[in-house]
């Protein structure tokens, strides 16, 4: 492990170039665009039923599945893991499968008029039995949500190492955890929005929308509505948060484009918060039965898991509903050295809102399960929670996991020790004992985890995905005036990627970030790319940017060598100029670039005109890692939890911009605290959603988020060309485990075990009442 000592722009906390326009209110969001027509969706009020009749008020312009029959259904595909393909019509046809499913679209001259008209549409549905929750879905007599999905199981993965049974049988102790993660909504500040405009001159449609994958949206929408892809332009302007929820294809986007084509006008749809909570992709709904087999020295020798993920009514495009159960299966052992592993992981359909990736995907859940296992094992062996982890964390690299994943150099033990020193465990234990004597209950919880980041096509291909994302391409050019433009396929939505990529380019080309423009989020202006998700942008788009910058650097040195009558190897790029090393012979970039375009005869055909290079990067992936430690106080009378302190020790390789890194971690931890204590989507037994407003679905405020103390380690891995690892999701992965472990530590005198999250006051009080019986 070494710390980055390279001088230059990389490693500096410069201010984000994205911020000035946002701070002064000049940002451009989809909802800001004017439109000639507005659409409002009529949604099912029942979870399962047959549509009998849809009646519209007089004068309303309404479209149902009958009018949209030519639009293909959304049908994402896997070719492995017993995947059952299920199709989602963009508007419900004869049946509805969840509360909030769109059944009709009403178009009017204003958003208010469209809403009024939609409220007057009469939809008659004959209820049929709804399947809510995986227990109901897996029951022997359960109705099928989809006729083709026997037993309501639509994806199933299995893995079992040859030595598993023998290792389990030889165990000194076997520890079991039943872990539960309740359903959540990503809750971006800006809900979904789409604006499609027909251009009569070019006969093209421009879709401006809040998305993380503009190129992917263009491809699939064009296919579904039967439009040549070149006739659809997709723009992702400023996006007010995505977190994975805006990665998947919403049927509403398809309909908005079709309406613009059909009506030859501009159409806008802006989702309200109630729609977002009811009908926009949910996440995190998993149950895990975990068994750990330990030897006499408290070393984990075998791990068995049974995972059930509630994937909702349909499969999300392009990742499919396999993303949560299959990631959970592949990454369950986490940072622990266990060679014998067995797992069955299933995705189960229910009459609830479809699921999609959300920051961290399955890792907050699997980290929670295995960290609860470690704490329970520590208690059984009479060990400190840190000590049992010391004995089991991976220490030698590269490391091949029981599921075949290659872990590159990392610092699992070192980050944990850093966090332990920062929290001062002995001092806390003394304070904890004193507080208990006074009737106050403090607890300390720890979570160590790995975060698979920056993985390309090999990882997605292993899932058997028909749409296999991974690589990124960057086009980098210097214009005749010496300014630089990078056009990227990645599509950031708040991560500061424009700033960090500018820092990488600036160092490579001897310039400064203020002379570099990064263009993204416009399919007419950028190379085809996969967007921004899965902690991949800096690793993959950053790698492609570095490769392209190296190509541009090579051309600049060649051009300068010709004009300065020197060897290209003797040219140094610095301070916006090319210089012959050790001399005063220099040529400014502006002069050099002008010559590359306007005086090509000077180079005698040795180089092509202009300065523009393209590079693609598709790595296998890398692993970041971290340790989170929380100190909480639990009010045993109310069940309320106060997070007193939160410490993060993390290793994400080279830090391109430490300030942006800290911001990503802080935002992720805030979401993780919400996941641990507050946010939960709740359905009743009939499939009615009970958390349809922010009065019921509780996001955190500044009051619930403590100051977050961050410590950095930097392992410069060979698995990534920039030496940087991804970290966008890491902040959200550790808090549920750290906080719930801390709650259990606080309540240890009552012999309480809380193994689900969010750990709400109601659940804590229920556990205390049960323990007192």
Image (cartoon, rainbow, N blue to C red):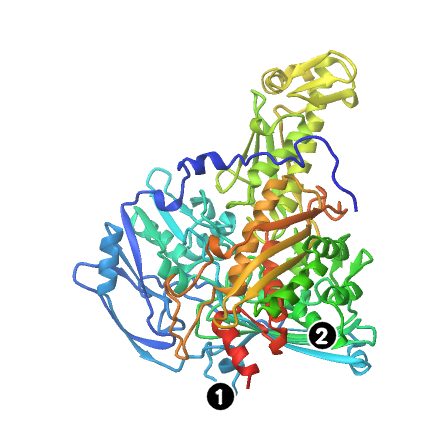
Can the viewer see residue 759?
Answer: yes
On the image, the x and y values in percent for residue 693 come to 37, 63
Badge 1 density bin: few <14, some 14–19, many ≥20, Cα 10 Å: few
Residue at the disc numbered 1: 141
As drawn, 593 above or below 753 = above
What mark, if any, has residue 553 been given in the picture?
A: none
The answer to whether residue 39 is left or right of residue 455 is left
Q: Residue furthest left?
A: 58
Q: Quadrant of residue 238?
A: top left
Q: How many marks?
A: 2
The answer to whether residue 83 is left or right of residue 125 is right
On the image, the x and y values in percent for residue 271 come to 36, 55
Q: Secondary structure at mark 2?
A: helix
Instruction: Pick the residue in front: 575 or 647.
Output: 647
On the image, the x and y values in percent for residue 78 come to 59, 65
Instruction: Pick the residue in front: 426 or 391.
Output: 426
The answer to whether residue 636 is left or right of residue 32 is right
Screen quadrant of the C terminus: bottom right
Question: Residue sitting at 73 percent across and 46 percent down?
Answer: 714
Question: Residue sitting at 73 percent across and 72 percent down?
Answer: 378
Residue at the disc numbered 2: 379
Question: Residue sitting at 48 percent across and 70 percent down?
Answer: 761
As drawn, 230 above or below 559 = below
Badge 2 density bin: few <14, some 14–19, many ≥20, Cα 10 Å: few
On the image, the x and y values in percent for residue 755 come to 59, 73
């Amino acid at each position: 492990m070494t710390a980055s000592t390279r001088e230059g722009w990389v490693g500096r906390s410069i201010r984000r170039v994205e911020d000035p326009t946002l701070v002064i209110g000049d940002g451009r969001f989809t909802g800001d665009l004017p439109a000639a027509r507005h659409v409002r969706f009529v949604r099912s009020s029942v979870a399962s039923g047959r549509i009998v009749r849809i009646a519209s008020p007089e004068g309303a312009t309404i479209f149902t599945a009958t009018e949209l029959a030519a639009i293909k259904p959304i049908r994402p595909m896997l070719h492995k893991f017993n995947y059952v393909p299920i199709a989602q019509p963009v508007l419900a046809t004869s049946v509805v499968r969840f509360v909030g499913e769109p059944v009709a679209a009403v178009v009017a001259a204003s958003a208010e008029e469209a809403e009024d008209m939609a409220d007057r549409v009469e939809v008659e549905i004959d209820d049929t039995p709804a399947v809510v929750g995986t227990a109901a879905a897996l029951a022997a007599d359960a109705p099928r949500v989809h006729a083709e999905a026997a037993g309501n199981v639509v994806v199933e993965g299995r893995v079992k190492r040859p030595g598993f049974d023998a290792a389990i049988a030889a165990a000194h102790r076997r520890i079991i955890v039943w872990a539960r993660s309740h359903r959540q909504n990503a809750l971006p500040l800006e809900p979904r929005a789409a604006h499609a405009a027909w251009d009569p001159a070019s006969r093209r449609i421009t879709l401006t929308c809040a998305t993380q994958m503009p190129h992917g949206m263009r491809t699939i929408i064009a296919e579904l509505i039967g439009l040549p892809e070149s006739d659809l332009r997709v723009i992702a302007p400023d996006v007010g948060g995505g977190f994975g929820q805006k990665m998947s294809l919403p049927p509403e986007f398809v309909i908005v484009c079709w309406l613009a084509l059909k009506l030859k006008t501009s159409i806008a749809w802006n989702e309200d918060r109630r729609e977002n909570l009811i009908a926009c992709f949910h996440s995190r709904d998993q149950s895990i039965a975990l068994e750990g087999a330990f030897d006499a020295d408290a070393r984990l020798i075998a791990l068995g898991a049974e995972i059930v993920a509630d994937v909702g009514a349909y499969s999300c495009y392009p990742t499919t509903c396999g993303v949560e159960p299959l990631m959970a299966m592949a990454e369950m052992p986490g940072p622990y050295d266990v060679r014998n592993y067995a797992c069955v992981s299933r995705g189960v359909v229910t009459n609830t809102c479809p699921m999609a990736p959300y920051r961290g995907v399955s890792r907050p859940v699997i980290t929670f399960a295995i960290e609860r296992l470690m704490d329970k094992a520590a208690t059984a062996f009479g060990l400190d929670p840190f000590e049992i982890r010391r004995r089991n964390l991976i220490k030698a690299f590269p490391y091949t996991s029981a599921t075949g994943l290659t872990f590159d150099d990392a610092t699992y033990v070192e980050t944990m020790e850093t966090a332990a020193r920062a929290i001062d465990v002995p001092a806390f234990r003394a304070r904890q004992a004193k507080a208990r004597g006074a009737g106050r209950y403090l607890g300390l919880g720890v979570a160590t985890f790995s975060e698979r980041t920056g993985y390309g096509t090999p990882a997605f291909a292993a899932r058997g995905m028909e749409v296999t994302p991974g690589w990124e391409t960057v086009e980098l050019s210097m214009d005749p005036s010496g300014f630089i433009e990078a056009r990227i396929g990645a599509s950031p939505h708040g991560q500061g990627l424009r700033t960090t990529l500018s820092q990488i380019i600036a160092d490579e080309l001897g310039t400064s970030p203020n002379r570099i423009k990064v263009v993204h989020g416009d399919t007419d202006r950028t190379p085809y790319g996969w967007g921004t998700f899965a902690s991949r942008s800096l690793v993959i788009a950053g790698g492609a940017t570095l490769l392209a910058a190296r190509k541009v650097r090579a051309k600049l040195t060649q051009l300068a060598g010709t004009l300065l009558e020197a060897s290209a190897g003797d040219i140094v790029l610095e301070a916006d100029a090319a210089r012959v090393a050790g001399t005063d012979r220099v040529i400014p970039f502006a002069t050099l670039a002008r010559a590359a375009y306007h005086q090509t005869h000077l180079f005698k055909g040795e180089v092509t005109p202009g300065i523009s290079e393209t590079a693609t990067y598709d790595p296998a992936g890398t692993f970041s890692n971290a340790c989170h430690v929380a100190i909480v106080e639990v009010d045993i009378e109310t069940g309320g939890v106060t997070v007193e302190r939160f410490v993060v020790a993390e290793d994400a390789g080279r830090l391109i911009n430490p300030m942006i890194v800290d911001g990503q971690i802080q935002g992720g931890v805030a979401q993780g605290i919400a996941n641990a204590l507050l946010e939960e989507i709740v359905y009743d037994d009939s499939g009615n959603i009970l958390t349809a407003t922010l009065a019921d679905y509780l996001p955190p405020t500044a009051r619930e988020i403590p100051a977050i103390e961050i410590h950095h380690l930097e392992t410069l891995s060979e698995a990534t060309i920039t030496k940087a690892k991804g970290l966008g999701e890491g902040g959200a992965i550790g808090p549920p485990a750290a906080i719930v472990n801390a709650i259990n530590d606080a309540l240890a005198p009552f012999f309480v075990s809380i193994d689900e999250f969010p750990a709400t006051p109601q659940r804590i009080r229920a556990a205390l009442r049960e323990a007192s019986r």
